[in-house]
Image (cartoon, rainbow, N blue to C red):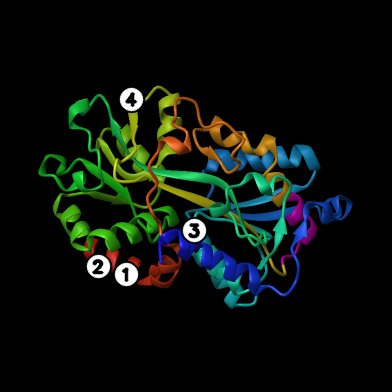
């Protein structure tokens, strides 16, 4: 079975796992949401964009957003610890982990809900019943300091990172903290084996927790190459005048949706639906390309000076397999780089 067929089988299973129908945007009770007064949002959205979204929603609705922001894997750990303890703190959760979002949806932890503009999100970036829908699309690329490397010396593929010429010049994030990196590490370790990461360690790659930290290392000139990092951070740095260029690997760029889901049993269910509906509004979606990222909606233009999705070769990602192996992948990564 191809990766795409496995993906379609997975989302079909999720869709049929629920005995109740999906709620739609027409079911949002705005008055009840305003009476609840706030929505608690757990998110791995880049902090600047997350705050813009929270502020815009508050301006439009008068409903306060209580924001908890961290890395995708950290968000999921907190959510699962609370769930296991019987706590219901989060109303809406946005991560960058479609693999675990599929699993949590199948386990019945999300409320199926189809916001306005649901049909404008690509099929592979949402659960068919609305158990989750992408907030944005993440491009995991290689980016470089153009004043520290000649153009002829840029890495063009993931395997290029193993060349001796890049020893001591690279930085990357930790999949135990960043869900996006978990997708990358899971896929590349499956393609090339763990020898790939052992060779990266031998090439003296720097490991940091977050995409912000990897960008900071590049901006400070500590390392000229970010391997498997979020393109929107590079785009934002370019906007600030930093000499950073994104490389879309010729063997495949990771294009990963960030699922947004309403939590079943949440304390502010009406505000949660109102917020989830807002997330796919035109005003909200346009914030992503304005900050250098890609919107989830196909009718929203890409970031300025960035390729359209159809111009980039996508890396095949088996989310079903990643969900099964994520704990093992994190453990093996830590053993390699401890």
The segment highlighted magenta reads: 266-275
Evaluate whether residue 183 shows in this view: yes
Q: Which x, y percent locates residue 246?
A: 35, 33
Label 1 and label 2: CA atoms lie apart by: 6 Å
Left or right placement of residue 150 versus residue 106 in this view:
left
- Could you say which disc has been placed on residue 331 in the image? 1
| Front residue of 36 and 244 | 244
In terms of secondary structure, where does tag 3 sit?
Answer: loop
Q: Which x, y percent locates residue 252?
A: 34, 46
Q: Mark 4 points at which residue?
A: 243
Judged from this view, the residue extending furthest toward the bottom is 85
Marks counted in the figure total 4
- Could you say which disc has been placed on residue 97 in the image? 3
- Could you say which disc has been placed on residue 335 in the image? 2
In terms of secondary structure, where does tag 4 sit?
Answer: loop
Judged from this view, the residue extending furthest toward the top is 241
Judged from this view, the residue extending furthest toward the right is 31
Upstream in sequence: badge 4 or badge 2 = 4
Upstream in sequence: badge 4 or badge 1 = 4
Determine if the magenta segment contains residue 267.
Answer: yes
In contact (CB < 8 Å): disc 1 and disc 2: yes
Q: Which x, y percent locates residue 324?
A: 42, 72
**Relative to 23, is 67 above or below?**
above
């Amino acid at each position: 079975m191809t990766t795409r067929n496995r993906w379609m089988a997975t989302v079909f299973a999720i869709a049929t796992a629920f005995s109740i129908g999906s709620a739609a945007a027409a079911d949002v009770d705005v008055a009840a949401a305003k009476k609840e007064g706030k929505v608690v949002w757990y998110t791995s959205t880049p902090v600047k964009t997350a705050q813009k979204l929270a502020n815009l929603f508050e301006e439009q609705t008068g409903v306060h957003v209580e924001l908890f922001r961290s890395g995708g894997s950290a968000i999921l750990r907190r959510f699962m610890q609370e769930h296991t303890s019987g706590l219901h703190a989060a109303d809406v959760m946005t991560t960058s982990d479609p693999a675990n979002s599929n699993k949590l949806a199948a386990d019945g932890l999300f409320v199926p809900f189809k916001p306005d503009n649901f049909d404008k999100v690509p099929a592979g970036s949402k659960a068919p019943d609305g158990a989750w829908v992408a907030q944005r699309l993440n491009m995991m690329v290689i980016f470089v300091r153009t004043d520290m490397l000649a153009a002829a010396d840029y890495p063009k593929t993931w395997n290029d990172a193993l060349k001796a010429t890049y020893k001591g010049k690279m930085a990357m994030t930790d999949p135990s903290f960043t869900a996006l990196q978990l997708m990358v590490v899971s896929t590349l370790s499956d393609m090339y084996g763990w020898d790939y990461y052992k060779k990266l360690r031998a090439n003296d790659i720097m490991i940091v927790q977050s995409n912000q930290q990897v960008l900071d290392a590049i901006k400070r000139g500590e390392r000229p190459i970010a391997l498997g990092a979020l393109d929107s951070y590079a785009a934002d740095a370019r906007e600030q005048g930093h000499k950073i260029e994104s490389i879309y690997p010729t063997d495949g760029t990771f294009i990963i949706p960030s699922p947004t889901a309403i939590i079943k049993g949440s304390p502010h269910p009406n505000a949660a639906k109102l917020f989830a509906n807002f997330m796919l509004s035109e005003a909200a979606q346009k914030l992503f390309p304005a900050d250098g990222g890609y919107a989830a909606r196909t009718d929203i233009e890409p970031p300025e000076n960035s390729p359209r999705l159809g111009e980039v070769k996508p890396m095949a990602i088996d989310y079903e397999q990643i969900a099964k192996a994520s704990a093992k992948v994190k453990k093996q990564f830590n053993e390699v780089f401890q």
